[in-house]
């Protein structure tokens, strides 16, 4: 896992700090912060500071001049908490390199109710960078944190993967059976509805397949191949991307047709695009 990259970051060692966050349990480190910033950024800290504060907590400091400063223990690592504070202090935000880092930050931001950090990290979670490559992981993260809007967004992107032939990911380990069933139901319902739209258009003809002596009232041979292959594809990935946006898929439907089927397929472009539009308009989220 990559480390979070900081660019001209603030070191959180200000001499005028009036609160010290003691991070980590095994190897405690100190982050010098400002009560006014924490109060403004987090209802959690605002409520904490509204309570009567003890003179000090049982943590030692290298400087005796800091003995009067309240110390608040937090189990998160220094890196995680410094990153969260970069979202509320007027300093450059660090670069998040992976979903693992993002998950750790989002969990802590939600725990301490860092509102600005939560909003920014939720937006990052459903960015194309992660949705296109890890849609199922994003869905699992959203479900684990009860982020309904983000789970809906991610569910749309899972339509492009085969749920029954996808490697296991840790993010799905702790989601509820209900959340997973909703995803399965979405895939099944959309696949069924899309397949039902694959009805041969009446005006779709091939000069040779539908000429006199052949099936003049039927559909071109390429259409039957197209419909069968499209239904098979939609069963595992109920999205139009693998069908209408894939030239190799379209070409393969003419293999068993007559010599003029490729031309008939090209001329059917408007019909196919209308069919694509109808499938794209089907419900696509949980």
Image: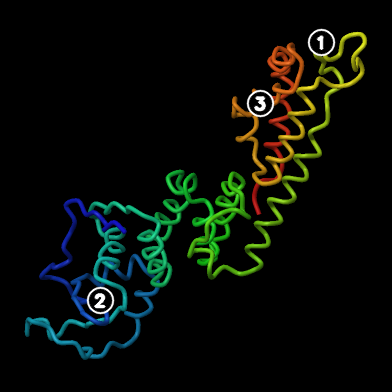
* Mark closest to the chain's N terminus, 1 or 3: 1
Q: Nearer the viewer, mark 1 or mark 2?
A: 1
Quarter of the picture containing the C terminus is: bottom right
Most distant residue in the front direction: 256
Q: Is 5 in front, or is 31?
A: 5
Residue at 35% across / 60% down in the picture? 101
Q: Is residue 264 left or right of residue 64?
A: right
Q: Which residue is mark 1?
A: 208
Q: Quadrant of residue 272?
A: top right
Can you say whether 90 is above or below 264 in the image? below
Q: Secondary structure at mark 3?
A: helix
How far is disc 1 from disc 3 in space, using C-alphas? 18 Å
Residue at 79% across / 33% down in the picture? 198
Quarter of the picture containing the N terminus is: bottom left
User: Colour scheme in the image?
Assistant: rainbow
Q: Is residue 97 left or right of residue 139?
A: left
How far is disc 3 from disc 2 in space, using C-alphas? 60 Å
Q: How many other residues sit within 10 Å of disc 2, few (<14), some (14-19) or many (≥20)?
A: many
Can you say whether 108 is above or below 187 in the image? below
* Mark closest to the chain's N terminus, 1 or 2: 2
Residue 23 is tagged as: 2
Q: Which residue is mark 3?
A: 252
């Amino acid at each position: 896992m990559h480390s979070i990259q900081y660019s001209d970051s603030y070191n959180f060692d200000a001499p005028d700090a009036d609160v010290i966050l003691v991070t980590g349990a095994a190897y405690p480190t100190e982050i010098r912060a400002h009560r006014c910033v924490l109060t403004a950024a987090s209802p959690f800290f605002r409520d904490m500071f509204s309570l009567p504060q003890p003179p000090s907590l049982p943590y030692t400091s290298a400087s005796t001049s800091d003995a009067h400063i309240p110390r608040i223990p937090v189990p998160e690592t220094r890196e995680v908490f410094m990153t969260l504070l970069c979202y509320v202090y007027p300093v450059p935000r660090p670069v998040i390199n992976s979903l693992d880092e993002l998950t750790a930050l989002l969990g802590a931001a939600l725990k301490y109710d860092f509102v600005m950090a939560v909003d920014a990290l939720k937006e990052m979670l459903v960015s194309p960078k992660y949705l296109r490559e890890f849609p199922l992981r994003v869905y699992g993260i959203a479900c684990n944190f009860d982020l309904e809007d983000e789970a809906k967004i991610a569910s749309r992107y899972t339509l492009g993967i085969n749920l029954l032939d996808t490697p296991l990911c840790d993010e799905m380990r702790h989601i509820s059976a209900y959340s997973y069933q909703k995803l399965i139901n979405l895939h099944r319902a959309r696949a069924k509805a899309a397949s039902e739209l694959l009805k041969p258009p009446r005006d779709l003809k091939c000069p040779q397949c539908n000429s006199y002596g052949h099936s003049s009232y039927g559909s071109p041979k390429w259409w039957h191949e197209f419909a069968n292959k499209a239904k098979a594809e939609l069963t595992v990935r109920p999205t139009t991307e693998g069908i209408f946006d894939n030239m190799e898929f379209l070409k393969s439907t003419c293999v068993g047709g007559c010599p003029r089927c490729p031309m008939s397929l090209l001329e059917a472009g408007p019909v196919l695009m209308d069919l694509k539009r109808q499938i794209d308009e089907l419900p696509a989220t949980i």
